[in-house]
Image (cartoon, coloured by chain):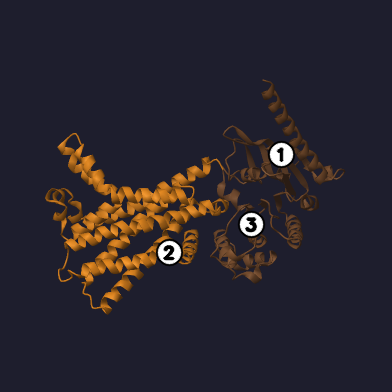
Amino acid sequence: MEQNNVAVKISQLSKTIKHKQLLKPLNYQLSKSKILALCGGNGAGKSTLIRLIIGLTKATTGSVTVNGLSKRKNKEQFLKQIGYMPDNFHFQKSMTTKETIKFYARIKKVSEASYKEVLKTVGLFDRMNEKVGNFSKGMTQRLLLAQALLSEPSLLVLDEPTNGLDPYWIKQFCKLLIKAKENQQTVIFSTHDLHVAEKIADEVIFLHDGKVMSKGPINNYQKDGLYETFQQIYFDSLHNEEQTNVTLVSSTHLS
Amino acid sequence: MRILTVAVREIKLGFRNFWTYSFLILLTIFTIAILLLHSSVATVQGYTDMTGTVINITLYLLPLITLLLGSFSVAVEKEDGQWRLLSTYPITVYAFLWGKWLGLTTIIMTMIFFSFGFAGLIMVIFGQAISIQTFIFFWLFSTILAIVYLSIALLIGSVVKDRWQSLIGGITVWFITIVIWPLLMISILGNLPSYKLIQPTLQGLTLLNPAEFVRIFSIMRLGAGTTFGAEYDQWITWATSHYGLLIFFGLLISLILISIFVGGLIWNWSDKHGAK
């Protein structure tokens, strides 16, 4: 892969907390204008990897560069390239949609016309004066996505973006990411929804228990399908864990 | 610019917060009570025993309100993930903290202004006499006290992770600086190895506690330093000196700057080294 075409370069990236390895060493390169889906069950390490990529969590080993910049060396420039959508987030309930997005837009120095355009994109323009506290989960997700889209960052990092979205908005979300890709933006998103991953991702990383079980271009999975691959990886791992537990229990009993 | 953006958001959030109004009602009732209390001896200008009592009562309530409002405001940002998102934006911890300070100062000053204004109005309507100087003195005393404690509240908010920790932190600071401070001073001064150390230690301790230096400065500027005892009055000479006002504001600004600086330093450190 040509180095100046690399959007995200992950080298020997790992995270350990109190002897528990949340992410085992990972090497990966993602080209510009590509969509990478991070798939895996609960506690697989998707959010940990996302936080490590954008530098919210300090890596135990390894490094990440985005368009050749590392957060450690050039924090402001590094952050300007990123639009992040967190999981499990609560907006200030007493603020309206407009006040909320305006706050984030001002910090990013984005014009009023731009943030209004973003609100139209996520379908919240007509709800500008509604309090965020009255929003459903899906609407909150859309507002979260809106703040990530501000300033058209070259890398979008989205943690479980389709959580709580209805089928119509999942479809819109897919269209939006494809449009972002066409606009030369690179996207990394985590999801449980393999149909979404299959539909829009160029590359996939399967995680289980902090370990990369499988990774590569989406074409590699076309033969078996993503769902079957995931099932195989996920259930095989659970089965192996059960086997280990049974063996441990048996040996304890025997001893 | 970013500081102002944070400050404007803080003001909006503050004035939509249920607790702001609860504290405002409490503060207004309290202000009416202390001014009524003081008006009973209003014919006497300057410092009276009642002035001292009113100052002490103010010292009990206002720092606690400020500590809780300020530290909660920062702790909530951490607990709800607001800061996690903001830390992916081009904004520094310091810009965020100064924005918070500016916004919260506006809210608290408005609260004090309203409570004193309302209390003053009540006093005029019911014909209770209180000199305008005394009124302005209490207002200024309360405002300065609140501003100082607000910076400490932001320091607490920077250190803690959630609301519970900020509650414990706020009450601990209030308890140490307000409730048990005299006992602490007596026990420290009583255990000094040499008599010569008493004066510098006393001076140092006075400057360490914001409530103490605001209280002492205010009372001494009213010409009532002898109420602390003859020796104390002779030792704590800075307040009545030619540069008293300059020293006082120097201390005030230093305390605000140090609190925000240390708060930002700890916050940055925990962001870099935090587990999550």
The chain letter corresponding to brown is A
Give the CA separation, mark 3 to mark 1. Answer: 27 Å
Residue at the image position 72 percent from the left and 37 percent from the top: A212
Task: Inspect the image, locate mark 3, and give the three-letter code of the amino acid beneath it.
Answer: Ala
Instruction: Name the residue carrying label 2.
Output: B20
The quarter of the displayed image where residue B142 is located = bottom left
Residue at the image position 71 percent from the left and 55 percent from the top: A162
Tell me which chain the residue with mark 1 is part of.
Answer: A
Q: Is residue B226 left or right of residue A31?
A: left
Most foreground residue, B247 or A57: A57
Q: Residue furthest front?
A: A253
Q: Quadrant of the N terminus of chain A?
A: top right
Task: Inspect the image, locate mark 1, and give the three-letter code of the amino acid beneath it.
Answer: His
Secondary structure state at the residue bearing disc 1: strand
Q: Residue furthest left?
A: B230
Secondary structure state at the residue bearing disc 2: helix
Q: Quadrant of the C terminus of chain A?
A: top right
Most foreground residue, A253 or A55: A253
Give the CA separation, mark 2 to mark 3. Answer: 31 Å
Q: Is residue B247 left or right of residue A56?
A: left
Residue at the image position 15 percent from the left and 58 percent from the top: B224
Q: Which mark is residue A148?
A: 3
Specify whether residue B139 is in view. yes
The chain letter corresponding to orange is B
Same-chain status of marks 2 and 3 = no
Secondary structure state at the residue bearing disc 3: helix
Q: Position of residue B252 (x, y in %)?
A: 31, 54
Instruction: Name the residue carrying label 1.
Output: A208
Residue B5 to residue B237: above or below? below
